[in-house]
Amino acid sequence: MSEFQPTERTKVHRVAQRATYDRDTIYSILDEALVAHVGFVDEDQPYVLPMVFVRVGDSIYLHGSTRARMLAGMVAGHPVCATVTQLDGLILARSAFHHSVNYRSVAIIGSGRAVEDEARALVALEALTEKIAPGRWPTIRAPSPKEMKATLVVELPIDEVSAKVRTGPPLDDAEDLALDIWAGEIPIQTSYLSAIADPTLRDGIEMPDHVAALVK
C-alpha cells in the first residue's frame, strides 16, 4: 500500500491539511534524519530520549545497552512514541502570531521487539553505521562477541505512523499585507564541517575517501 491508514493514535487533528500518511514521504523523512526522540513512561514518569536510528524495510532499529530501561520496556511490550523532525526554514511573518517554521516530521507509535538473531542484529548495526557514514562499515573492526552480548538491538515496526509537513511562505492576515514589515522564509540546511582527526591517530593514516566525501 502506498499510504498508511491512520489510527486513533496517529490521525492528525490540529492543522490536518499538513498531515500526510504517504509511505514514500514518511520513509524519505526517516531516511534523512539521524536522530529520533523516543518517549516512554517508566513508573508513571514520562521520559524522552534522543536516539540514533536507522530504517530497514518497514521498521526502524534502535540499539543500546542491554541494561537500558527504555529498550527493556520496549521489548516487554510497553508502548513508545518515536518522533523525527527535520527543520527546513524559519518563517518570519508580519505579525508575531504568524511566525513559524517549515518542517517535516514523523511520529511512530508502537512497541518494540528484541532482535535476538545475531546475524539480523549485525545487519541493523551495519545499516546504522552506513547511514551515518556511507562506506564506513567495510573499513572498521566488526563488533566482538562480547560487544554483541552487551548490545540490545530493538526493532520498532512502522505500523502506526503519521507525518506532518509545513512548506511555503508566511500566512499573514490579509489586513497585515500592507504593513511596512519584511516577511519571508530563511531556509535552513544541515552541512558537515571539516573533519578533525583523532589526536591519538598514528602518523601516516590518511583520511579515507568515504570520510572525505562527507565533508567536501
Image (tube, grey):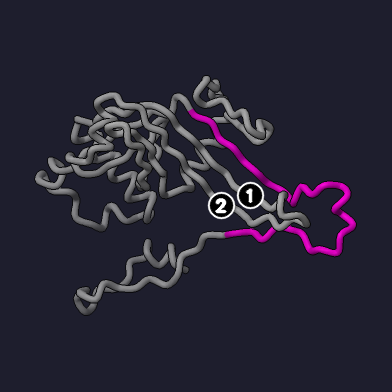
Where residue 203 appears, as percent x and y from the top left, is 21, 79
| Image disc number at residue 118 | none
Q: Circle 2 sits on which residue?
A: 87
Residue 202 lies left or right of residue 61; in this view the side is: left
Give the amino acid at mark 2: Leu
**First to last magenta residue range:** 161-188
Where residue 135 appears, as percent x and y from the top left, is 35, 55
Q: Is residue 168 magenta?
A: yes
Q: Secondary structure at mark 1?
A: strand
Q: Circle 1 sits on which residue?
A: 102
Residue 167 lies left or right of residue 190; in this view the side is: right
Name which residue lies at 87% across and 47% down: 174
Give the mark nearer the N terminus: 2 vs 1: 2
Between residue 149 and residue 163, name the one nearer to us: 163
Residue 79 lies left or right of residue 85; in this view the side is: left
Name which residue lies at 35% across and 50% down: 130
Are the residues flagged by discs 2 and 1 in contact, CB closer than 8 Å? yes
Q: Secondary structure at mark 2?
A: strand
Name which residue lies at 38% across and 28% down: 157
Packing grade of label 1 (10 A; few <14, some 14-19, many >=20) is many
Name which residue lies at 35% across and 27% down: 79
